[in-house]
Image: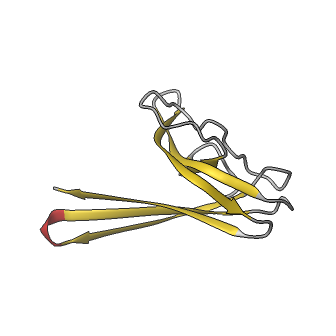
Amino acid sequence: VGLANQSTNGIVVGTGNTAVAVTDTKLVTQIVHGVGAGQLTHNAHIYTVFTTGGGTTTMTFARTYTNNSGGLITVQECGAYCQGGSSNWTFQIIRDTTGAVAVNATKILTVQYTSTSTV
């Protein structure tokens, strides 16, 4: 679970624009938590799970980022990291390129993923 002020798991964002490949293991250029140049404040995740008829369950997870750096930051990739295993390894489960999304100083970016499964 990605906690507030933490950029090592959960939804993550970056500035890399390399095409997505099946061999990707992390974002190309991840934006870390902070208020310095090129950094974003990582806020806590918001999870929503609901079940509809027919055994379908939908989970939405989202995270907001606040640009407190004083300058423009352009987000071009996003993804999700998980931790697990006996050594608590961190591994990537999602990586998407977004195109250039400009986040001006003091503005908030929201990244949301939705997953649906039927049993």
The mark total stands at 0
Q: Position of residue 110 (x, y in %)?
A: 58, 65
x, y percentage for residue 46?
A: 52, 66
Q: Residue at position x 64%, y 41% from top?
A: 16
In the picture, measured across the screen, residue 116 lies left or right of residue 42, that is left
74, above or below 66, in the image: above
Q: In the displayed structure, would residue 59 be above or below residue 78?
A: below
| Residue 117 falls left or right of residue 85 | left
Quadrant of res 26:
top right
Q: Residue at x 85, y 51 (%)?
A: 37
Does residue 96 lie above or below 88 as drawn?
Answer: below
Q: Quadrant of residue 66?
A: bottom right
| Left or right of 13, for residue 92 | left
Residue located farthest toward the left when viewing the structure as drawn: 54
Q: Which image quarter holds the C terminus?
A: bottom left
Residue 109: x and y, percent?
A: 64, 65
x, y percent for residue 14: 64, 46
Q: Residue at x 57, y 36 (%)?
A: 18
Is residue 2 in sight in this rendering? no
The residue positioned 79% from the left and 50% from the top of the image is: 38
